Image (spheres, grey):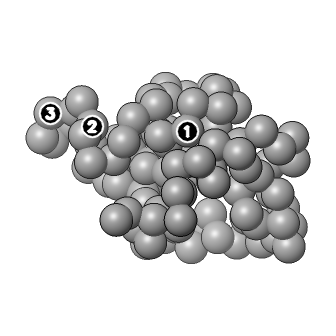
Amino acid sequence: MDWRHFWDERSKLKNDFVASARSTSTSEDIEALALDAAAALQLTPNSRVLEIGCGPGLLTKALMSKAALWVASDYVPRFVARVRGTPRLCADMRRLPFRDGAFDRVLVSSVLQYIA
């Protein structure tokens, strides 16, 4: 399976839930997932977070205000372009341009299974 092509095609879809392959999810589901992620990350107002695989930004929107810095990244340019209100980066998670220690938290949600 060519996952890069798959996600590039999904990014063309207008509906964020469908594009992110969460078509059966509701806003309440995303909010619950965001609360779980915030607790697992132990977010504080001083946290510096790198989100890898932000997709269209469903979790980004729900969580970015809970940290001092939130950088949303994805390797699909159309997904990155959808994210608003926080720094964003189009990059492959295996080659990120950040120095060690730039972030104190990393959120990787529904991404690792696509790494070959």
Q: Position of residue 106 (x, y in %)?
A: 35, 54
Badge 2: residue crowd in 10 Å (few <14, some 14–19, many ≥20): few
Left/right of residue 32 with respect to residue 113 in the rendered view: right
Distance CA(mark 2)–CA(mark 3)? 9 Å
- Type of amino acid at the residue the image marks with label 2: Leu
N-term mark: 1 or 3? 1
Q: Which residue is mark 3?
A: 99
- Type of amino acid at the residue the image marks with label 1: Val
Q: Residue furthest front?
A: 1
Q: Which residue is mark 1?
A: 76
Disc 1 or disc 3, which is closer to the eye?
A: 1
Badge 3: residue crowd in 10 Å (few <14, some 14–19, many ≥20): few
Q: Position of residue 101 (x, y in %)?
A: 15, 42
Residue 28 seen from this side: no
Q: Which residue is mark 2?
A: 96
Disc 1 or disc 2, which is closer to the eye?
A: 1
Residue 40 seen from this side: yes
Distance CA(mark 1)–CA(mark 3)? 22 Å
Q: Residue at x 33, y 47 (%)?
A: 93
